[in-house]
Each structure stands twice: as structure tokens, then as C-alpha cells.
Image (cartoon, rainbow, N blue to C red):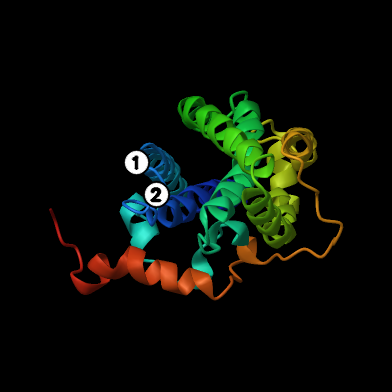
Amino acid sequence: MKNEALYNYVLRLGDDSLILGQRLGEWCGHGPILEEDIAMTNISLDLIGQAMSLLNYAGEIDGQGKDHDALAFLRFENEYRNAILLEQPNGDFAHTMMRQFLFDAFRKPLYEKLLDSSDQQIAAIAEKSLKETRYHLKHTSEWIIRLGDGTDESHQRAQKALDLLWRYTDELFFETEEDLALVAEGIVPAMKVIKAEWSKTVTAVLAEATLNIPTNNWQFEGGRRGVHSEHLGYLLADLQYMQRAYPNMKW
């Protein structure tokens, strides 16, 4: 039971990084300025690197001989456990930055708490990933403030992105009875602790950006259980094409 709970938890972490990394990589060559094009591509690569470490560990826990490639390329849509927020289309630059910011504000305190995990492998992955994630949050926070407190046009686009994406944020703090057992063993942190830190960061940055937190409390969920939006299928078609077309191909 513990192995299954740990597998599911690590798989969720890996899928979050994989799907967001793939989505962010779509900006490569299309950034608004050269410097930002490179920055977004590097963040995408960071996330893919995190996904590799996490999915490899998930494969080890599962014990079925699957590595990160098998888990990334050879699952069906309903077997992915990423949050629905992360599969949403890029939209404009403000939309992409807002999606990334809302996630980074969640991932940073999560990795900080996972540093103290009693599972040494999780703690090691968190230590390496935290260095990258701190930069990601700094980068997106600055852009949210710049866009929100910028021109009328940039403010309007940033507010529209926040209004559209806010409904997906609650799923980031998904927690099962199995997860609570891992919390009790000191393997993972309680999500209520992470949500408190997330709320503190998000509230402060959005206030400085002169953006209003939506009052609509409707929340979408399902991704953690394999029920996704229509967007994930199209994303996976791109992600998996080469492996599906040429199985076991070696570079």
C-alpha cells in the first residue's frame, strides 16, 4: 500500500513537470523578445529534467521495469495525473506567464518541504529542483508585476489570464487518504501547509501587480484522477508521435 501511494505521489509530480515543460516548449522560437524566448525554453528544459528524475523514480517504485521514457511516451491520456491547469493552451504571453506563476508559487514551497522528506531520493530530487524553481518563481513574479502594473493593455491581458486560470488552482492541493499516510511518515508535507505559503505569495504578487483575485469560487478538477480537458490529447499527440510512429527508436 505504501509503495502504491508513493508511486502515485511521485507520478503526479513527474507528470506536472512533463506536461508543463512540453506546453512551455511550444514557445521556442516564438517568444516576444529573444531574451524571453531563451528564458522560457530554459525553464521548459528544467521542467523536463525534473520530469526525468521523478518519472525514473516512479518507475523504480513501481518495479515493472519502466523508465522515464516509457512513462512519458507509452501511457494513455487517462493514465496521466497532472493538474488540469498545466495542460491549458499557452494563449498570449500574459496567459503563459500567469499559468507559470500560479504553478511556481506552488512548486517552490512544496520542494522546500520535500527537502526534509524521510525518503532520501525525494529529498535529493527536491534539492536539485528547488534551485531551478526559485529562479522560475522570481522570473514569473517579476513578469506578472510588470504586466499587471504596466500599460492598460498589459493589465487587461494579465487580469483576463488570471480570471481564466484561477478556477484550476485548487486542484494543485489535491490530497488523498494515501497521501495523508505518507504525511504521517514524514515522506511528504501536508497540502494545507503548502496552500498557506502559496496563498501568501500569490496574494502579495498580485497586489503589487494591481490585479484582482477572482471571486468566483468554481473550481475544476479531475486531472489528478486521470480525467482531463480536451487539450491534453492534442498535447500528447505531439509529445508521443515519434515513439508511437517508430517504437523503440534509438538516436
Query: Looking at the picture, which amino acid does disc 1 mark?
Result: Leu
Residue 113: % across, % down: 65, 28
Q: For the point 53% across and 62% down, which residue is it?
A: 91
Q: For the point 58% across and 55% down, which residue is it?
A: 95
**85 relative to 59 in the view: left or right:** right
Q: Which residue is mark 2?
A: 31
Please determine whether, in this image, residue 230 is positioned above or below residue 248: below
* Tag 2 secondary structure: loop
* Depth check, front residue: 167 or 1: 167
Query: Looking at the picture, which amino acid does disc 2 mark?
Result: Gly
Q: Which residue is mark 1?
A: 34
* Depth check, front residue: 80 or 162: 162
Q: Quadrant of residue 208?
A: top right
Estimate the spatial distance between the alpha carbons at disc 2 and disc 1, rounded to whole Å. Answer: 7 Å
**112 relative to 196 in the view: left or right:** left
Q: For the point 36% across and 72% down, which residue is it?
A: 237
Q: Quadrant of residue 225?
A: bottom right
- Circles 2 and 1: CB atoms closer than 8 Å: yes
* Tag 1 secondary structure: helix
Instruction: Give the total number of marks visible in the rendering.
Output: 2
Please determine whether, in this image, residue 45 is positioned above or below residue 75: above
Residue 195: % across, % down: 76, 40
Q: Is residue 67 visible?
A: no
Please determine whether, in this image, residue 244 is positioned above or below residue 156: below
